[in-house]
Amino acid sequence: MKFRLFLLSFATLIASCQTSSETIAFGGNTIVFYDGKHGIQVEYYSASGRSHLWYPGNDRSIPGRWRLRSDRNEVCFKLPSNVYNPVTNKQLGSWDCKSLDRLKRNVRSSCSGDPFRLAGGKIPFVIEKGRGQLGELKKTCS
């Protein structure tokens, strides 16, 4: 089974509403973010370097890995090779690193723990593309 998902602005975790000067905290947190190309995405990052992405249209969360680069200015993500990015039209499976400053722009809320239980693979409902469900998700994770 191939999954559609976003990697370009893959999730980062922030303690609350952020500005470009705030530090991003990883491990044991969930974030809700939005961008116009992919829509709403929710991701849980474990302290052990595992991630679980809830992406629009998917019927379960996508397991992956995350790590900070040694300079702490970039975060790198790796998703399974059977994952497909519908925006770039590419198969994934390799490590891909992104600027933390760039990723912060899409964060809409964050919270401690895994309130949506994404680590178990199940999701509460299928996210529709667009902003329609953003308020509901932010209420659970704020």
Image (cartoon, rainbow, N blue to C red):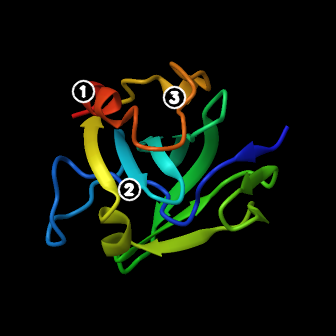
The residue under the point 17% across, 47% down is 16
Assess disc 2: are there few (<14), some (14-19) or many (≥20) residues with their C-alpha within 10 Å of its C-alpha: many
Percent position of residue 80, x then y: 74, 51
Horizontally, is 35 left or right of 86 in the view?
Answer: left
Percent position of residue 86, x then y: 70, 57
Amino acid, disc 3: Leu
User: Mark 3 or mark 1: which comes first in sequence?
Assistant: 3
Quick one: SS at disc 1?
helix
Percent position of residue 12, x then y: 38, 56
* Image-quadrant location for residue 109: top left
User: Mark 3 or mark 2: which comes first in sequence?
Assistant: 2
The residue under the point 80% across, 55% down is 81
User: Mark 2 or mark 1: which comes first in sequence?
Assistant: 2
Q: Quadrant of the N terminus?
A: top right
Quick one: SS at disc 2?
loop
The residue under the point 21% across, 34% down is 142
Which residue position is annotated with label 1?
139
Residue in front for this viewpoint, 16 or 74: 16
Assess disc 3: are there few (<14), some (14-19) or many (≥20) residues with their C-alpha within 10 Å of its C-alpha: many
Q: Is residue 48 visible?
A: no
Labelled disc at residue 12: 2
Labelled disc at residue 118: 3
Q: Are marks 2 and 1 in contact (CB under 8 Å)?
A: no
Labelled disc at residue 35: none
Residue at mark 3 to residue at mark 2: CA–CA distance: 15 Å
In front of the other: label 3 or label 1?
1
Amino acid, disc 2: Thr
